[in-house]
Image: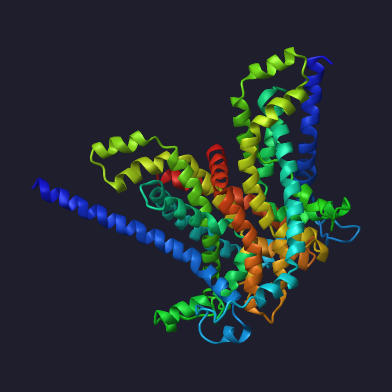
Amino acid sequence: MNYSLQRKLIIFSFLFIPLALLGVFMLLPTFKLFQFSLTDWDGYSKSFQYIGLDNFKTIFLDSGDVWLSLRNNGYYFIGHLAAIPFEIAVASMLCGAVIGSRFFKSIVFMPYIINGVAVALAFSFFFSPSGGFNAILDALHLSSLKQDWLGDYRVINFTLVFVSLWRYCGQHVVFFIAGIMSIPKEYYEAAEIDGANKFQMFRHITVPGIKTIIELVLFLNVRGVLAAFEIPFLMTNGGPGYESSTFVVYTVKEAFQFSHVGLASALGIMLMFITVVVYILQKKIIRISG
Amino acid sequence: MEESKQVRRLRRLSLTTVIKYAVLIAIVAIVFIPLSVILLSAFKTPPEMVQGTVFALPKSLNLNNFTDSFKQAKVLLALKNTLLITVTSVLLNVIIGAMVSYIIARFDFKAKKLVMSIFMVAMIVPFTTIEVARFSIVKNLGLYNTLWAPILIYVGADLMQIFVYKQFIDKIPESLDESAMLDGASYFTIFRKIIFPLIIPAALTVAIIKFVEISNDMYVPYLYIPSDKFRTLSTTLMVFQGDRTLDWGSLSAGVIWVILPALVIYFVFQKYIFSGLVAGASKE
């Protein structure tokens, strides 16, 4: 077989399966999501009706709990965003001269590799009224601060955000470590000769040197916090009421509990737009503030 | 004058050192304290659970919780299913990823931009909400409640993986391909005999992190393979969660059963896991 024919054949055959998989399990569902969002489909009936933009109208006008859920995503967003400077600081500590840096690195990343359901259960226990956290408060003579950390609507989101931070911060730290390692050592040596202190080096060498990684983490962060699901779903199922629900918890409930597939699809479309909009806004704000 | 400056410098240095270690030790404590409650409770008998605080040491190394939860959570079955799904998807994923990357790295063709943008779209689409529509497709294909559903969902190549592989393929000199072609080797032979073996190291790093993520995934098995015989390490723990008369002792032991395999893999392959993440992060 000549090479020009072979060339066509291999390009086609090697791309066929991967693209078919992507088409069937990613693109087709995305397309269907748009289609369903204009219908009243319940997920199991043979037929459905096109109802125009009614689902979107319902979301905007009579689903207060969607907005409550989206507000809760805000807690995750602020929590994880506020953690980023701290993550960078920890990463730069671990890249410096630290005794046992390998040990610390593996501990920092460990929560990320632990099964999410196991994490959720462990923390359900830890934050239960007779659990570990209240026991610590007792031991510190702070009994007056004891709470039902997963029952009281005033604290519940903070508890869940803490669990989310516990689980995901380590991943970001490892990304930042990767970035810092790629900065040439000579920059730091030169700065030291010029008499720069640790903080100045951090501010003027480390942070600019990992700009692309920071951008990556900011993108993953927006996508991750807006899709926050596993922790609230497993630990509180969004309750009490919708007090600890998130946008995706709400969507999943609508789809699989209440059989409002049409409405849930509209919510899915909205999430895509919200993700893109928040990411662009965040980028603009960062550029303005330098 | 000169001396006191140095002294001040030293003092400041030691202060930052103290802060540094204090922060790191605090992090270790935050990571371990919640897990330590699980570890301690797993050895406690029900009466012990109600006496004393959760941080009290168990009176004996009572293993009843471990044996109970091992049976209740069907740990062996869950482990078998998890391994079957994860190993199959990761192996197929490595092959598929290598195939795509080979074409992208070595050939120029009209639809190349289009192919790349399709992979880009797939990265941006939010994965949890897509299930709403994917569910009906999986059902229509007759894959619901079969192991093929999670495998086919996990197996797709992603953009990050393609970038990492491509970077490796770019380092393989094209003269190697050309000399093979002079010997009459087909493109397929070139891929199988030259390209694929050389990207195995890159594949390994991506594969391990994928392995951990797939084996920890809860939502896909929960949604697509709810049948009891298909329970995975994630979904089997949800059996405990639904149970409102919670027995924290055996639950803790169940959590340990599920965490253990991942921790073993983590500490054995740590080096590769880190380099996999690093490779991914520096390419995206």
The residue closer to the viewer here, A266 or A186, is A186
Residue at position x 76%, y 44% from top? A27
x, y (%) of residue A43? 83, 60
Q: Is residue B183 above or below residue B72?
A: above
Residue lying farthest to the top in this orientation: B182
Specify the color scheme. rainbow
x, y (%) of residue B254? 66, 70
x, y (%) of residue B163? 62, 35
Residue at position x 57%, y 47% from top? B273
**Can you tell which quarter of the image residue A248 is in?**
bottom right
Q: Is residue A216 left or right of residue B111?
A: left
**Can you tell which quarter of the image residue B65 is in?**
bottom right
Q: Is residue A235 above or below residue A103?
A: below
The residue closer to the viewer here, A102 or A196, is A102
Q: Quadrant of the C terminus of chain B?
A: top right
Is residue A37 something that shows in the picture?
Answer: no
Residue at position x 35%, y 45% from top? A202
x, y (%) of residue B34? 52, 69
